[in-house]
Structures are given as structure tokens and as C-alpha cells.
Amino acid sequence: MLTKTKIITAALVTTGIGFFSVATAQEAASAQRTRPNIVLILADDLGFTDISPFGSEIDTPNIAELAATGVSFTNYHTAGSCAPARAMLLTGVDSHRNGVPNIPEALPPEQLAHDNYQGVLNDKVVTLSTILQDAGYHTYMTGKWHLGHTPELLPSSRGFDRTIAMADTGADNWDQRPYLPIYEQANWYADGERHTLPDDFYSSKYFIDKTIEFIAENEADNEPFFAYVPFQAVHMPVQAPREFSDKYAGVYDEGWEVMREKRRLAAEAAGVVPRNTETIVTPGTLEWDSLTGEQKIHHARRMEVYAGMVDAMDMHIGRLMTYLKEIGEYENTLFIFTSDNGAEGSNLIGVNGRSAPGIGSWFDRVGYNSDLETLGEPNSFNAIGPNNATIAASPLAYYKFYASEGGLRVPLVMSGPGISKQNEKTDEFTFVTDLTPTILSLAGIDKHEGSWKGDAIEEIIGVDFSEFLSGTESAIHSESEAIGYELGGNRALFKGDYKLVFNRSAVNDQNWHLFNIKTDPGEAHDLASEEPERYAEMLDDYEKYESSNNVQPMPEGYIQRRTIFRDVRFN
């Protein structure tokens, strides 16, 4: 089948005469090639080594195909929780300036009093989709939004032509039902209107079905498209068709200690982390041998379902890739695959496979269970918990919400037009706000400079690394550039190869730490006392970041889970 470029070229040549017509056709073809299609795929709560190019035992051949034809970033960082990561991803603006410094469900009343702490995208930012839409792109979104429920905040009002949007923190993957008692219903929208899911719904399948449908609607008009596909996989409830979960039967029977080490060795062999990377055991992690046989079986099955959900997501990504090949658009499509944050460590299911205290009565009322025989299937609630999350994050420390590497460092794979690197891995530091300016550059569109349609807006702070992708530059961020981060009192500052980090929620640890995260991604060697001048300099940099971005202190005694469930009556 002819590509859009070939169709335009043929039409211009046949309607013109002589050299001028051929030159015009060539110019048109060249212009078309500078406007690639863009597919931005966002997994939810996917850990650092949960895909095969990064050392996983989980089968992800389609993501691996993208990695083989592009570049994998092994030192890419995002936020430690979903909504702040999504807001920065889609705007290139710091979370404390775009209105989403934390998920709205977790914001305490003291912070909600501040304009920059509403947990939804404010009107001071312009989204990547709006800029692309204004430049003539068709723009589509299918999946989890979580940046606002009201009409002016839904994706249909933030630059997307066609949308299927789940507006909450998460939802069931099989049915139209909420997954937590903080919601009365699962809030789904299609093109800005309330939406009813089909009877044969499974989230990963449906999102790709609708993406293909949206692309097909405009396939013949020769305009490029931007498709944003934020999956629910592998956010809890972790659910997958049984045929995918059963592929991993027995894989996790040796437990998280053995699997963490297997992941570390595989990541080293793949060039994802340095050889002999040292690791720490995330505080609070249980010893596998302390569990009963029944508990071990249940925990292993939780991971089998988790692996099945990743596998199913990859298979559906492959369906989109195949479709684009069939219509002649694959070679002209820029693919970006990443995750919103590190692996989920919440413990809504106890070590015995029963629901955590307090939430069990709600599970019973809505018909959820965690039975081993049907785990991951319809009516089943599954979560891998903090112990298994150390596998997904391995060889990094901690997981989602924390400012340690296991919470912030996730895979990033980019492939397609403008990327000269093939089957390469790079440990160049990149941050989530860098993606918007880079995507715009690859699409041949100038980023805004703090002004849009005559209105002053927040400037994009991310770095355009398109020249790094093309091979004309060897570095992305300068060693003197300081990049601050805060979420829920967990804080970090990146500068060169170094990271200053403080985890307010860490177990028995209320200190700042300094690490060289390029040579020590496992954060095993605190350099604070060895390099006091660097430590002091970076602490000063963080304080400047906090002040200039209006970062608010956490209230005394703040606990995220209590805030999220503050208005819930379980009985």
C-alpha cells in the first residue's frame, strides 16, 4: 500500500510539468517526512526491569522490536506517582507549576488551599496534544487520564480530537466498576461524554481497538496523527486473561529474593546497569522463607498474573504495530514507550491472599475476591504488594511513591523517524519533562516560549534531546544543570551523574542521601559524608528549587493512605 508521502508525490508529479513539478513533489515529500506520526505509549506502574530488553523474564517481543530499531534509555526518570508524571509528560512543565504536584486523592486540606495544589491540569499550561492539534495533527487518546473529571479538564478539552478516557486513579480491567471505595462508579468518558463499556471489555484490548478505529477514520486524508495510549496495565487490580498468566506458571516459585538477583544479572548482561551493581533490600521486605507454603503459592501466582498482564499489553501493542505496517505508516511513525512511575507497592492484599484490614467488607459488598484459582480473572482483585514490587524494580531500591530509583527510574524506548541509533542503550540522564520538547522537535514544531494565542503560560522547562537521538550531540543535560523534584514530601535533586534524595515516608530514615546514580543505580553507597561540598551545593540547589516552585510542606502526621481513604466508610 502507498504511504501518504508516496500518494502526495504521485499526485503532484502527474498534475505538474517538467522539473518544477518534480522538485515541488520532492519538497512536499520531504515536508511530509518531517511530520511523522507519533505513538506515545504509557504503561502504568511498570517496574524498571519489567520488559525483556531491560532484563525481564516476561515476554515482550513487540517492545523488544522497538528497542532493536531504536534506543533504550536506562537512566530516564519520571515522578513517583501517576498524575504528576502524566501532567509533566504532556506539558514539559514541573508538577508544582502545572497544578498536579500529587494525585488529587492524596492532597491534604492544608495543601488544597494553594492554587498550584489542585491535582488537575491548570489553565496556565498548554498540552503536547494541543500544540500538535494546532499544527494539523489528528490527536487521539485511549486509556487512563487522571488529570481532571470536569468538562474543561477532560482530554477532549485539552487537545484531543477523539478520546476514550478513564478519569480515575484506576478501574477494573474487565468490567465498568470502581476498584476502590473512594469512587461511587468507574468514571469513563468518550469524546467528553459519559461512556458505557462494551460487554467484551478488557482494558488493553479495548484501548488498542479504539486507537486503530480512530486512526482508520482519517487514514485517507494525508495528515499525521498523534496517538496517546496510557494503558491501565499493570496498575491494580492486576488482571489478565488466564492464557497469558498461565504462561508464567512456576516462574516465581523461588520467591522474590531469587527473582531480584536473576533480574539484576539479566539487566547487567543486557547493558541496562553497570556490571556488579550493588543493591540494598528495600526496608520492610519480608524474607521468602518466613512464609508458609500456602502464602508462597499465592504470592507466586500474583506475579504470574502480573507477568501475564505485561505480556498481554505487549501483544496488543503488537496489534497496533501490525496495523500501521499494513496501511504503510509504520516506517513514518515515532514510537515512545515508557511508564508513569515505578512498580506499585501498596498492600491491599495481605500475605495470606486475603484483603487488607478495613477494605475486606467493601470487597465482599462489590463482589471482589482474591481466590487463588481465579486470580486475575473477572471479579478478582489482585495486587503484587511491596515484596513482589522489589522484583519489578530490581536492582533498584524501593518502588512507587518513593523518591528512590525504584520509584522514579523506569524504562524509556524510542524508535522511528529522527532516531539514528539502532539497538542501542544509553545511560544519559533524561527527565519526564524532556519528552514534550523532544517530540515537538521531531515533528518539526517549535515549542512555545511561555506564550500561547496571546496568553502568558508556563514555559516548557524540559530539554529537547532530538539532536542526541540523531547522533549530532553526545550529551543531553549539562553537569551544572540542577533538576528538582518533590512529591508528598519525598524529594530529590539531580545534577550531572549525582542525585540528592530524601524519603519522608522511608522506614526509620529521615536523612538526605547523596548517590552517583550512573555508577551506583542501586543507591548502595551514600556519598554525603565523602563529598560534603557536593552535598551542600546540591542541598542549596534543592532549596532554591523548592522556593522558586512554591513547594508546600507536608502537614504534621501526613499519611498518604489515610488521606486517600479519609471520606470512606467501609461498612
Image (cartoon, helix red, strand yellow):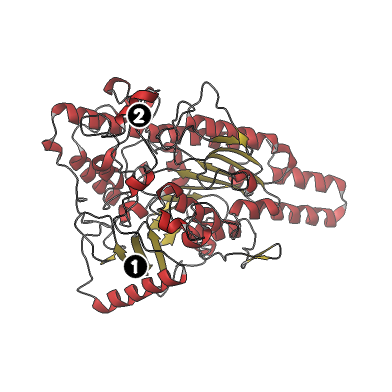
| Residue 362 marker | 2
Is 381 rendered above or below residue 271?
above
Left or right of residue 107: residue 520: left
CB contact under 8 Å: marks 2 and 1: no
Name the spot of residue 336 as percent of width and height, x first.
50, 48
* Residue 369 found in image quarter: top left
Local crowd at mark 1 within 10 Å, few (<14), some, or many (≥20)? some
Name the spot of residue 274 as percent of width and height, x first.
28, 57
Identify the image quadrant of the N terminus. top right
Name the spot of residue 290 as percent of width and height, x first.
11, 37
Q: Nearer the viewer, residue 530 or 81?
A: 81
Which mark sits nearer the N-terminus, 2 or 1?
A: 2
For the image, the number of numbered tags is 2
Left or right of residue 549: residue 446: right
Kind of residue at disc 2: Trp
| Residue 406 marker | none
Left or right of residue 25: residue 410: left
Query: Can residue 484 be seen from the camera position used here?
Result: yes
